[in-house]
Image: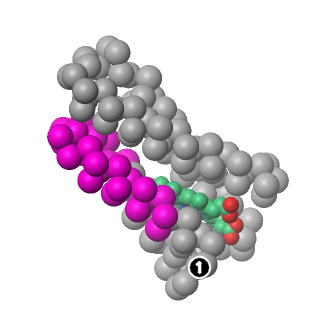
Amino acid sequence: MDYPTLKIVHLVGLVLVFMGLAGVLASKASTDVPFKKRWLFHLSHGVGLLLIICSGFALAYQLGVREVVPGWLKGKMVIWLLAGGSMVLATRFSRFAGSLLIFFALLVLAAAWLAIEKPF
Ligand code: HEM
């Protein structure tokens, strides 16, 4: 896959992940919607995580990353883990919906900053 296409897949993945998180958060915050009615958001989150990690490593490979993984990429891996674990937060702590939305936005901001600035 060429570089621009991988970037599109990466961005679609990130949108799916955060749509999934926001969807679960909204359905838990309004009324406790049963899993049967919110599984699509869990699927969106899972597929998105898969797209992000696959396209992320493919992009890194095309940027010339081999044995030595730069700090900014390690940072993005941590953010990916946090985005994965965030489903637990969205499911269990929907009473803090406002704070969680800010936290999710900060994850995207940090990931984008690391990719674009590559500060370390
Ligand atoms: C939730 C987690 C992540 C988010 C929100 C995210 C978000 C982003 C964004 C917004 C960009 C910038 C795209 C652009 O230049 O227009 C990007 C690029 C990139 N990301 Fe991620 N990313 C995540 C996880 C990862 C992971 C896990 C990896 C690799 C293991 C990765 C590797 C990359 C690479 C290599 C680039 C391209 C940098 C460049 O073109 O110079 N990302 N990501």
Q: Position of residue 65 (x, y in %)?
A: 65, 73
Along the viewing direction, whichever of 68 and 109 lies nearer the viewer: 109
Q: Position of residue 53 (x, y in %)?
A: 54, 52
Q: Is residue 24 left or right of residue 55?
A: left
Q: Is residue 13 left or right of residue 91?
A: right
Q: How many marks?
A: 1
The answer to whether residue 57 is magenta is no
Chief secondary structure of the magenta portion = helix
Q: Position of residue 45 (x, y in %)?
A: 44, 37
- Secondary structure, mark 1, is loop
View extreme (bottom): residue? 120
Q: Amino acid at mark 1?
A: Lys
Q: Is residue 62 above or below residue 16?
A: below
Residue assigned mark 1: 118
- The image quadrant that residue 106 belongs to is bottom left
Per the rendered image, the range of residues in magenta is 84-110
Colour scheme shown: one colour
Which image quarter has ligand 1?
bottom right
The CB of the residue at mark 1 lies under 8 Å from ligand 1: yes
Task: Name the residue located 78 percent from the left edge and 57 percent from the top edge.
Answer: 3
Q: Is residue 72 above or below residue 94?
A: below
Along the viewing direction, whichever of 88 and 103 lies nearer the viewer: 103
Q: Position of residue 68 (x, y in %)?
A: 57, 79
- The image quadrant that residue 22 belongs to is top left
Q: Is residue 45 left or right of residue 25?
A: right
Task: Name the residue located 59 percent from the left edge and 70 percent from the top edge.
Answer: 115
